[in-house]
Every structure is written in C-alpha cells, then in structure tokens.
Amino acid sequence: MSRPIHAVIHYAALQHNLKLINSKAPSARVWAVVKANAYGHCIEHVFDALRGADGFALLDIAEAEKLRDLGWRGPILLLEGVFDPRDLELCSRLGLWHTVHNETQVQMLAAHKTQQGHRVFLKLNSGMNRLGFDPIRYKSIWTRLNAMHQVEEISLLTHFARSESPSDVLQTLSVFKHATQDLPGERSLSNSGVVLGHSDLLAGEGFPDDWVRPGIALYGASPDAQHKSAKDWGLLPAQSLRSQLIAIQQVHVGDRVGYGAEHVVTKDMVIGVVACGYADGFPRVVGSAAQVLIQGRIRCSIFGRVSMDMLTVDLTPCLAQGVPVDVGAEVTLWGKSSEGVELSIDEVAAHAGTIGYELMCALAPRVRVQRDIDIG
Ligand SMILES: *Cc1c(COP(=O)(O)O)cnc(C)c1O
C-alpha cells in the first residue's frame, strides 16, 4: 500500500459552488478559473464537475492543451496573455482567447501571421498596478487593436485589488466605467469576492459582468476568510486532505516530542503520529493551536514541530471521549472527514498566517489526488 496521505476532490461540492456563483450573477457567463492546476485540485479531476461553466480561464498553455485533450471545445482564456510570439501560434491553433495587458503583447499581435481573428480581453489597470493599461491610454490601445486584421473581437477586463468593501468596489468600478466609456465589447470584472459579495452592487450601477471569473469560490474556500467564512458564504469544500495515524506513543511527564525537543510533556499523554508533513504541503509554521480531525470527528491539537514527513498530535480528546484510536485511524488535515465533519482549510491557513488559496495550491506532487466519484 502507498503512503496513506491523499487529497479527495468532491464532485458535488464543485457543482454546488458553481451553482452558487450562477445564482449570484444570473446574467453573467462564468469563466471557471483553473490556473495552477485548478488551485491544486488537478484539472482532470475538476473538469467534469465544472464543465457546466461557459469557459475556463488559466495561465499556462500546457493546461489549456490538457483541457482540449479532455474534450473541451468551448472558450479558454489566458489571463496573463502570451509571453512570446510562438504562444500566439498556439492560440491560433488551439483557439485560445487571450488577455492583452502590455505594449509588447500589442506589437506581437500586430506581427502575428494568422488567417483567424483572435478574441482578446484588453486589460485595464484600475489601480492594482500589476497588469493592464493606464486609464488614459486604454482607448487608444483599443483603437489600435480594433484596426488589426489579427483581432476579431475585443472584450474589456479589469481585476479588483480589494473586493472586501463596497466603497472600494465602487471606486474601482468608476475608474473602469470612465476608461471604457463608449467602447463596445463584453465586460469582465468580478473575481470570487466580488461575485459573492457585490454582484448586486455592480448590477445596481448598471454594470453587471458579461463574464465573471471565480476561482477560490469554486473550490469552497473563502475569498475573505478574515471577515466571512466559506460556510457563511454557503460554499462547500472541494478538497479534503486526509491521512492516517502511523504510530502511537505513550509519553510521560518530562518527555519531549519532535525536533528541537521544545515540546515538553507536562502530563502523561498519548501522542499520535500522522503521515503528513511539510513535504506534503502542510505548513510547518502552524503552531500547536492548529487542530486535525481524528477518526472522522474528534478535534486534536498538534503537539511538537511539524517535520518533513510527519506531524504529531495530542490524542487526549479521543481518550476523554472514549474513542479508541490505533494505527490506521483516519486523520483529516483540512476539508471534510469521511464522516462528513468539516475542518476548514481557511482555519488551518489562519494558524499559518496565510490564506486557504496558498495551502490548496501548495499541495505537493507526492500527494495522491483522487475524485470521490468517477464520472465516465
Ligand atoms: C486568479 C484570478 C481570478 C480568480 O480569483 P479568485 O479570488 O480566486 O476568485 C480572477 N481573475 C484573474 C485575472 C485572476 O488572475
């Protein structure tokens, strides 16, 4: 048998989360964002559940090819556009739509030999100062693209730096409105945070998205966990990281546990050794405040440092509740246990001083990923 750590991808949760997005932005089409191998979930494991989306958005052409190989004939959008002229040839061949966010990309497109007009999303820098053209130059770039035989259709895109507060969203929206005034074309603005929290606001301003771009919400973590949990948004976790206990240790007062021997035992206790470490993508930095679920439902705290291949937990709560534990007992690191009890990835992330996004994307290649049900 292989090492027991594995990630389970929940088909029904992905579908539920996609439906929730649809209900929040009923008039919009949905780009399911599947960059970074579907936020660590594996494109091939989420594809069937998300094929009800209108298109897939990502960064790497290799991932776009994977979607074509899986049989997806619909739209695919490259969110960072192309990096060199050869990428444009691949866009023509694979029928990829692409973002245009800088002058170099405009020039590459002007020099690109193609029979087939490209669908481009012209990106506005609405204040985040990462990608996109300044509001002052936006219309002139649009005009240049519009004159190119290489361009069939131009859509208008921006990205919100802050999706938490309505006033920030309104301010970004006003920059976008002003820069794109009188330009035709479909509009794409909202990521998960804005779709979930402020679709009504955009619609009320007469600026609903034609295309929304949810990522994290599809995978069931919160875009803004500090203020609102995934559960509060009505999202279901799409990924569960599970393993097993591979050893049990009885320890006594004065004993020490783990590297650095920092954790001194102050009462006789039972320690469980879990086959999960930082080389699996579990953050080493979580302190002993972080918890895992043992036997599907009992919360136990981490005790001692997380090491490369293992972590250790205090099994006292299991003994207190009279639940016998032995080698082979299920351990849920985040997501949902096989008994359906949840431990949010955002909770673990908070103990590591980060966000759920980072943990799901950092799942290590050595962790097996499997679907909970197989389709076809
Ligand atoms: C990653 C990304 C998204 C998705 O963001 P979430 O916060 O995960 O919903 C949307 N748009 C762009 C341009 C992105 O790069």
Image (spheres, rainbow, N blue to C red):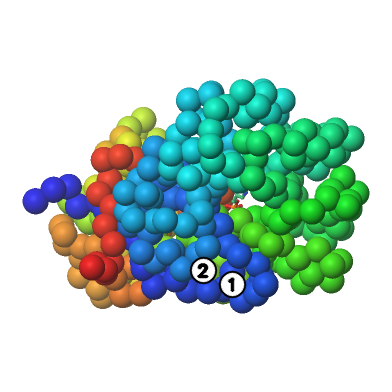
Residue 20 at what x, y percent from top left? 56, 73
In the image, what residue occupies the spot 49% across and 38% down?
92
Residue 52 at what x, y percent from top left? 46, 68
- Horizontally, residue 72 falls left or right of residue 7, namely right
Quarter of the image where the C terminus is located: bottom left
Tell me if I can see residue 237 in this picture.
Answer: no
- Horizontally, residue 350 falls left or right of residue 103, namely left
**Which is nearer the eye, 324 or 31?**
31
Name the mark on residue 308. Answer: none
In the image, what residue occupies the spot 83% across and 54% down?
173
Residue 247 at what x, y percent from top left? 17, 50
Q: CA distance from mark 1 to mark 2?
A: 6 Å
SS for callout 2 = helix
Task: Tell me which amino acid carries mark 2.
Answer: Leu
In the image, what residue occupies the spot 58% across and 62% down?
30
* Contact between labelled residues 2 and 1, with CB atoms less than 8 Å apart: yes
**Which is nearer the eye, 220 or 153?**
153
In the image, what residue occupies the spot 74% across and 54% down?
185
SS for callout 1 = helix
Residue 220 at what x, y percent from top left? 50, 63
Query: Mark 2 vs ligand 1: CB under 8 Å?
Result: no
Tell me if I can see residue 70 in this picture.
Answer: yes
Residue with the mark numbered 1: 22
Residue with the mark numbered 2: 18
Task: Tell me which amino acid carries mark 1.
Answer: Asn
**Which is nearer the eye, 173 or 224?**
173
